[in-house]
Image (cartoon, rainbow, N blue to C red):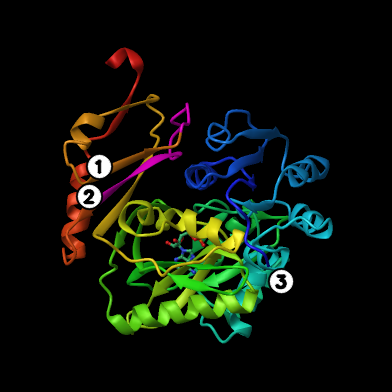
Amino acid sequence: MRAISPEATIGILGGGQLGRMLALDAKRMGYRVAMLDPTPNSPCGQIADQQVVASYGDLAAVQRLGVMCDAVTYEFENVDVRAVELLEGSGVRIAPGSRALRVAQHRLREKRFLRDQDIAVTPFAAVTTADDLTSAGEHVGYPAVIKTAAGGYDGKGQAVVHTRAQALQAFERLRGRELIWERFAPFTRELGIICARSESGQMVTYPLTQNIHEENILAFSVVPAGVPAPVEERAREIAQRIALGLDFVGTFCVEFFLLPDGELLVNEIAPRPHNSGHYTIDACTLSQFEAQLRAICDLPLPAPRLTSSAVMVNILGSGSGDRLLGIPELLSDPAVSLHLYGKRQALARRKMGHFTLLRDPGTPPAQLLQTAREARKRLSWGSASAL
Ligand code: AMP
C-alpha cells in the first residue's frame, strides 16, 4: 500500500481523549484531521479541522466522513462494525479493519480467537439462559466475573461472584444481554503492552507496563513493569502473534494477568491506543499515537526506545467541582508533564486528564509508584469560587 503524504486528511471515529491525542500528533506531523462524534466541541473536536456531529450509527454521516479523508481510524472499540464495513466496502482506507474490530469488541469472540491461537486465557463460558448460568457455575467454577460480552468498559457491566445466589443476582441485573462467565484469575499483577503494525507488516512493541486499577479504572501505569525479562519477552511474543492473527493495522494494547507461577493470561485486546500507553508520549522516542498514524499511513515504524522510567497517573473527576486545583504544586516537579483533555464537567470517575512523572532509568518501580501517589495528592477538584 502506498504511504500517505502529510498534507492528507486523517479521519477519526470518536471524539474522546484518545482521538484528541491522536489528532495532536497528526497536526504536529502536518495532517489535516476530520472527526465524527455526537457531541460538538468534544476533546478531539477541539483539535480537529473538521467535525461531523452525528451518532456513530449514522451510516450516512460515516460515509460523509470517509469521503473527506485519505485514511480513517477509530479511537474506541464500541464503534458500529457496520460503519467500518461500509467504509471498507466503499474503498476508503480504514484501519484497523472490521475483522479485528469484530473480534476485539466482543469478549466471547475475543477469548475464542485467543484460544484458537493457543494463547492462554482464563476458563470461560457463554451465558444467555439460567441453564447456561448453572452449567458455567459447575464447569467453569467460582469465584467468577460475569461480564457483558459487548459494550462494557472500565468495569461497567460486570460483577464478581462467589456464590450461586450472587451469580443469580448479577444475571438478573444484566439479563437480556449476551454474557460471559470468566473464572476469576488470582493474578499478582496486571500488565499491558502496546504494539503497532503497519499496512506493509512492519511491527513494533513497547515496554511492558504494570497497571494498577482503583475501583476497576486504571489509576497508574508503571514502566518498566519490574517483571523478569522472560515474562516481558513472552508478552511481546503474544502481542505479535495477536497482530498477525488479526492481520492488525494500527496501534493496539494487550492486557494481561500475571499469575503467581509466572503464567500470563490475556484479559483483553483493545484495538486502539490505550490509556496504559499514554506514558509513551513523554517517555518514548515514538508515541503510541504517532505509531498509529505511521501504521495506518504506511510510514516507517522505528522501534520505540524508553528514554526514562515513568509512571502515568490518571486524573479522574470527583464530582465536587470542575476546576483542577494544585497544578502549580504538581508542576513544581520539573519531570512532570500534564495532559488535560478539555472536558468541562469533572463528573465522578470521569477521565479528565493524566500526568506522566519521569525518573532516571533504573529507579525501582515501587519507588516510582510511591512518588506518583504523593504527586497525585497535590491535585484536587474545587469550584471556581473556591479560588
Ligand atoms: P475488564 O473490563 O475486562 O478489563 O475488567 C476490568 C478489571 O476487572 C480488570 O482490570 C481486572 O482488575 C478485573 N477483572 C476482570 N476480569 C477478571 C478476571 N477474570 N479475573 C480477575 N479479575 C478480573
Are dots 1 and 2 in contact, CB under 8 Å? yes
Rendered location of residue 345, percent (x, y): 47, 27
Residue 346, magenta (yes or no): yes
Are dots 1 and 3 in contact, CB under 8 Å? no
The numbered mark, 3 or 2, whose residue comes first in the sequence reads 3
Rendered location of residue 253, percent (x, y): 49, 64
- Number of numbered tags placed on the structure image: 3
Residue drawn at 58 percent across, 36 percent down: 48
| Nearer-the-camera pick, 233 or 217 | 233
- The tag on residue 131 is 3
| Nearer-the-camera pick, 315 or 278 | 278
- For the residues marked 1 and 2, what is the alpha-carbon distance in whole angstroms? 6 Å
- The tag on residue 99 is none
| Callout 2: SS | helix
Residue drawn at 63 percent across, 52 percent down: 74
Q: Quadrant of residue 95?
A: bottom right
Q: Relative to residue 197, is residue 176 depicted above or below?
A: above
Q: Quadrant of the C terminus?
A: top left
- The tag on residue 376 is 1
Instruction: Determine which residue is flagged by label 2.
Output: 372
Q: Looking at numbered disc 1 in the image, what kind of residue is underneath it?
A: Arg
